[in-house]
Amino acid sequence: MNHRWFTVVRLGLALEVSVSVVFGLNIVQALAQSNQTTEDNLGGKTTGSGIAVHYPTEFPLAAPAGQNSDAIDKALPGALNEGPLNAQTWQRGPADAPPPNAKIWNPVMIKMMKGEKVTGGTLFSSDSPETYCAMANAGYDFIWVEMQHDSRDWEKVGRMWAACPHAKAVPGVRVANADEREIQHAVDLGALVVIVPTVRSVQQGIQARDWAFFPPLGDRSLGGGQAYSPTFWGNVPGGYRATINQNLVLIEMIETLPAVMQAKQIAAIPGVTAIFAASSDLANRSGFRPGSPDYERLINIVHDAAISEHKRLCGPISWLNRPDFTCFQAGSELSAITRGVADELGPLKDTQGKPEVGPYAEKNQTGRPN
């Protein structure tokens, strides 16, 4: 017998068996994961949303096999909604209704409802869970994770929030725009404060609201995500699905002249908690600097819209003492570190030694060491 040939065959068979086993395990693992995440599980399994869905295994009301049941025009016996199907007149069922006298569990919403001042610390560029958690436990009410002007992805945001979901500050985010994908990612990952930038019209403001809230207030899809898990909000009194509409804080930003003209109507949208007078972009788009009469008129229009509709009014932290402003965007993680070091070191800040040579030597106007 050719021992070399036998060895090759034996190794080939072993490799084939190994691949088959690994491949088989991967299939089993994939099937297990699919059973956790699909919306259409059967037999009362738990979906990836963390909600137990108990589907029937017998179907007495099902359409007869191979026959047109005419369900588009005829209601089934015992149905609340009779006659031809009409989405405009549909009477919603009691499923997922919040329990009577449900208490608010989002601390930011509690302060908003009381008219107390709320601060959001900005996490601008870091995707470090350690940095996020340090910010979240530093004393802010929520963390404003920046997704409009930064290029981080949602997976990194979810990882940061999962590192300390019940920190002092609740997870918040400024999404890139009023887009279903953006807002769906934010809320499914656990955001309790959603800031929508550059809302240019009432229609766009309504779209943002619809993506953020479940029916009947909005049109958010019921899917998976860590927001539903017990480590986040899965164990809140009344359940996440039934109570998040009462707890989610939605802030829509007024940043353009057309939006200023519609600020009152945007503030009036049901579900909008607050409107934000975007100090920088209103200057950018108006051509007038803060403090000038034309600029201040725009801010005052946003102010008037908020108070007329009994909504909260947000702005930069520098407007902490501006009348009627109660929620604020604070500085970024970099500025927070700088301020923290200044408070800790006091007069010792920036008192480094000054060598005459080398990279730490004082530089002259040419940029070279003296």
Image: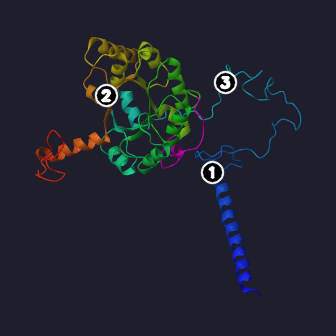
Q: Which mark is residue 91?
A: 3
- Which residue is pictured at 52% across the width and 26% down the height? 209
Locate the N terminus by quadrant.
bottom right
For disc 1, the neighbor class at 10 Å (few under 14, some 14 to 19, many from 20) is some
Question: What amino acid is found at the position of numbered circle 2 in the picture?
Answer: Pro
Residue 260 % position (x, y): 41, 15
Residue 133 % position (x, y): 36, 48
Q: Earlier in the sequence, mark 1 or mark 2?
A: 1
How far separated are the C-alphas under marks 3 and 2? 43 Å
Q: Nearer the viewer, mark 3 or mark 1?
A: 1
Quadrant in the rendering for residue 146: top left
- Which residue is pictured at 32% across the width and 12% down the height? 297
Is residue 16 shown above or below 259? below
Q: In the orientation shown, which residue stands out farthest toward the bottom?
A: 1
- Pointer 1: what residue? 36
109 with respect to 354 (left or right): right
Question: What amino acid is found at the position of numbered circle 3 in the picture?
Answer: Gln
How far separated are the C-alphas under marks 1 and 2? 42 Å
Say whether marks 3 and 1 touch (CB < 8 Å).
no
Say whether marks 1 and 2 touch (CB < 8 Å).
no
How far separated are the C-alphas under marks 3 and 1? 31 Å
For disc 3, the neighbor class at 10 Å (few under 14, some 14 to 19, many from 20) is few
**Residue 213 visible in the picture:** no
Q: Give SS at disc 2.
A: strand
273 with respect to 34 (left or right): left
Q: Say which of 345 and 58 sits in front.
A: 345
- Pointer 2: what residue? 316
Is residue 230 located in the magenta-colored stretch of the structure?
A: yes
Q: Earlier in the sequence, mark 3 or mark 2?
A: 3
Which residues are drawn in magenta?
Answer: 219-237
Q: Main secondary structure of the magenta part?
A: loop
